[in-house]
Amino acid sequence: MPGKSGKSSRQPVLGTPSDSVDPYLPDNGNLGFRISRYDLDLEYKVASNRLEGTATLTATSYVELARLSLDMASTLKVGKVTVNDARARYSHRGRKLFITPASPVPPGGAMTIVIRYSGTPRPIRGPWGTVGWEELTDGALCANQPNGAASWFPCDDHPSAKAPYRISITTDSPYYALANGVLESKRVRAAQTTWVYEQLEPMSTYLASIQIGPYENLRLASKPVPVEAILPSRLKENFRIDFGRQVEMVEAFTEMFGPYPFAKYTVVVTDDPLEIPIEAQSFSTFGANHCDGSRDAERLIAHELAHQWFGNSVTLQQWHDIWLHEGFACYAEWLWSQRSGGRSADEWARHYYAKLADNPVRVPLVDPGPRKMFDDWVYKRGAITLHTLRLRIGDGNFFALLHRWTDKYRYGTVTTEDFIALAANYSDTPLHDLWQSWLFSPELPAFGEPS
């Protein structure tokens, strides 16, 4: 995609319409090419937290590339880089891997980039805490959002740069290893087991994940959507209470939002407590503290499941539109509450509206700022915005809109403007006043207004 101006010294980032990297994460994302597939061959030793990997990236250039860059944490050491089977020079500083091919890649040129690396993966620290590869007491997990993927593999770490993946993970045989997609093969060789997963539907880097632990597999349903869990055996009894309505929840959300977008859904429960659950494409991860037999975490279970539609399949193009993920997933909590006999969505909307009114925010929902984008008010105001829309256009049109949204943009990337344009087809009256009040103005409108 050509740049907007021939005078610009920057080359376009692939897959975004703005010809620039995301201003919320200006150090992430890479310009001038597009990765169309990731093949990751990884070996991980649990006791020493040692990772060895070979990443094969299939890519296409948009412009002539004498040099290109990838996101890659400094805790990983690069051993060798080739581009189209020819050895390439590279430098690795900060969290960028700069690669100079043996000869420039022409516009539209195909590239196979192979990077061999190793190291002790650590989370990346930023305004949102630490994200990425994280050791557990006995195992490991990956929680990448928004910029932690580079902690364990070289990548174009931007949400709009989606691609299919094959992930092969070899680890100590007593451990269960899970990655995104469908398990294609499992091979045991003495003390090690190799697990190979295929994620065919395009995936953003922040949603790529590996989970390793002393887990057992528990099958919950085989159709219409295969649902399973991996968890420590000691938590099975609690799991049947806390996640007892997981399959019913999948069925309800399929009815509300449209067909489940991936081949299966897996729930991971770690043996360690986790501060918050974590979504990944085709699975969600919870801590042992979310599986205590109280069923207190059911709203979080609904939230993470809803992300498979809103965030994982239909993904924002830039981070300032995070309400398209979190507002929708939060509203799904309220819809499930009503479906399962708890408070109605309207009661929850009024409850959280009162809290927002007591703590006013001075920035608009569509641009909360990078440090505030995961603040709770974004989730709640986003959900109330959807409820306001539902009151305005009626239940039939509202749920028809959600079905069309998840279908039209399935496996793609979106903007707030895309949702506004689509919603116009489901309303008999203009919605400009609603969007202006709830999305673009910092002030909190009166509940239910404009209606």
Image (cartoon, rainbow, N blue to C red):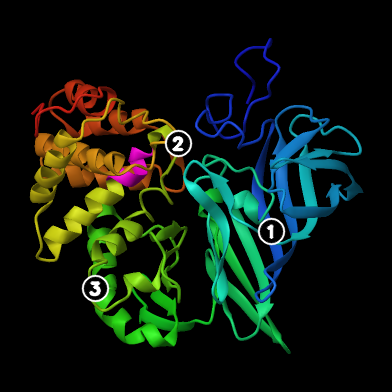
CB atoms of marks 2 and 1 within 8 Å: no
Residue beneath label 3, please?
Answer: 245
Can residue 259 be spotted in the picture? no
Q: What kind of element bears circle 2?
A: helix
What amino acid is at disc 1? Asp
What is the chief secondary structure element of the magenta stretch? helix
Q: Give the distance between the C-alpha atoms of the residues marked 2 and 1, in whole angstroms.
A: 26 Å
Are discs 1 and 3 less than 8 Å apart at CB?
no
Residue 390 vs residue 248: left or right?
left
Residue 431 placed where, x, y %?
Answer: 19, 25
Question: Is residue 5 shown above or below 386?
Answer: above
Q: Are marks 2 and 3 in contact (CB under 8 Å)?
A: no
Please state which of residues 271 and 261 is positioned toward the viewer in this rendering. Answer: 271
* 326 falls in the magenta region: yes
Tell me which residue sits at (29%, 29%) in the image: 420
Q: Which residue is mark 1?
A: 39
The structure residue drawn at horizontal position 58% and vertical position 25%, both measured from the top left corner, is 20
Looking at the picture, how far across and down is residue 323, in whole percent?
33, 39
Left or right: 86, with 435 as reference point? right
State which region is magenta.
Answer: 322-327
Query: Which numbered dot is residue 319?
Result: 2
Residue at the image position 45 percent from the left and 73 percent from the top: 272
The disc placed on residue 134 is none
Q: Nearer the viewer, mark 2 or mark 3?
A: 2
- The amino acid pointed to by label 2 is Trp
**First in residue order: circle 1 vs circle 3:** 1
Camera-nearest residue between 175 and 59? 175
The quadrant of the rendering that contains the N terminus is top right
Local crowd at mark 1 within 10 Å, few (<14), some, or many (≥20)?
Answer: some
